[in-house]
Image (tube, rainbow, N blue to C red):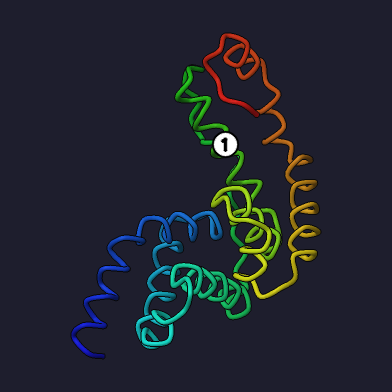
């Protein structure tokens, strides 16, 4: 790789590392797996940086590599992982703890989704990509994105830990007091 292209790649990685790791974390549910997954995708991007950098949207190109590497992870290794719905210690209920419970419940619920539904939910609702952008990233039709999102959201709504946190009395109090966010 030429020095100029290598500098472009390093600039790309510096600017987008945290966003790619966050996306990978949402796909994997584990910080260590997320960093490994991001490194794997970036290593593949480095090898073909000339092609990646010439694309209309290099970040979308690398994000697709990230999703593909995550899918490969499931094909290669079928190790069962069990995520807990709640932390083992219970602290007093304040806004920070409530937020942590919501996040923990959401991550547990995301971990229970099949990989394609999880990828669609993460990219569509967390990364705030349009249906067309998600479809392009995943290499499928917008209709598939819509159906996978619908099925994924339906499963998330039935996840008991998530429903309990979102519908619990602490959430209602903070929302009615004007301190909480929207659902």
- The residue lying at 69 percent from left, 65 percent from top is 116
The percent coordinates of residue 167 (x first, y second) are 71, 24
Query: As drawn, which residue projects farthest toward the left?
Result: 3
In this rendering, position of residue 166 left or right of residue 180: right
The residue nearer to you, when weighing 42 against 112, is 42
- Above or below residue 45? Residue 132 is above
Quadrant that contains the N terminus: bottom left
In this rendering, position of residue 94 left or right of residue 3: right
Quadrant that contains the C terminus: top right
Q: Badge 1 is on which residue?
A: 86
The residue nearer to you, when weighing 88 against 93, is 93
- The residue lying at 42 percent from left, 82 percent from top is 54
The percent coordinates of residue 93 (x first, y second) are 51, 17
- The residue lying at 25 percent from left, 72 percent from top is 10
- The residue lying at 68 percent from left, 53 percent from top is 112
In this rendering, position of residue 156 left or right of residue 124: right
Element type at mark 1: loop
The percent coordinates of residue 11 (x first, y second) are 26, 68
Question: Can you tell which quarter of the image residue 38 is in?
Answer: bottom left
Query: As drawn, which residue projects farthest toward the top?
Result: 177
Neighbourhood count class around disc 1 (C-alpha, 10 Å): few under 14, some 14–19, many 20 upward: some
Question: Can you tell which quarter of the image residue 44 is in?
Answer: bottom left
The mark tally for this picture is 1
- Above or below residue 41? Residue 145 is above
- Above or below residue 125? Residue 99 is above
The percent coordinates of residue 68 (x first, y second) are 57, 75
Question: Can you tell which quarter of the image residue 159 is in?
Answer: top right
């Amino acid at each position: 790789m030429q020095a100029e292209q290598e500098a472009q790649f390093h600039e790309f990685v510096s600017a987008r590392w945290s966003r790619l790791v966050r996306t990978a974390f949402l796909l994997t549910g584990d910080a260590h797996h997320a960093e490994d997954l991001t490194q794997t995708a970036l290593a593949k991007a480095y090898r073909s940086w000339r092609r990646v950098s010439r694309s209309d949207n290099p970040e979308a190109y690398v994000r697709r590599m990230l999703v593909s590497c995550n899918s490969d992870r499931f094909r290669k290794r079928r190790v069962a992982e069990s995520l807990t719905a709640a932390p083992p210690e219970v602290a007093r209920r304040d806004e920070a703890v409530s937020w942590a419970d919501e996040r923990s419940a959401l991550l547990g619920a995301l971990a229970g989704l099949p990989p394609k539904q999880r990828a669609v939910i993460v990219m569509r609702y967390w990364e705030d990509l349009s249906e067309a952008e998600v479809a392009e990233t995943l290499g499928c039709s917008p209709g598939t994105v819509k159906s996978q999102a619908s099925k994924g959201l339906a499963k998330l709504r039935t996840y008991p830990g998530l429903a309990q946190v979102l519908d619990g009395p602490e959430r209602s109090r903070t929302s009615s007091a004007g301190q909480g966010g929207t659902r």
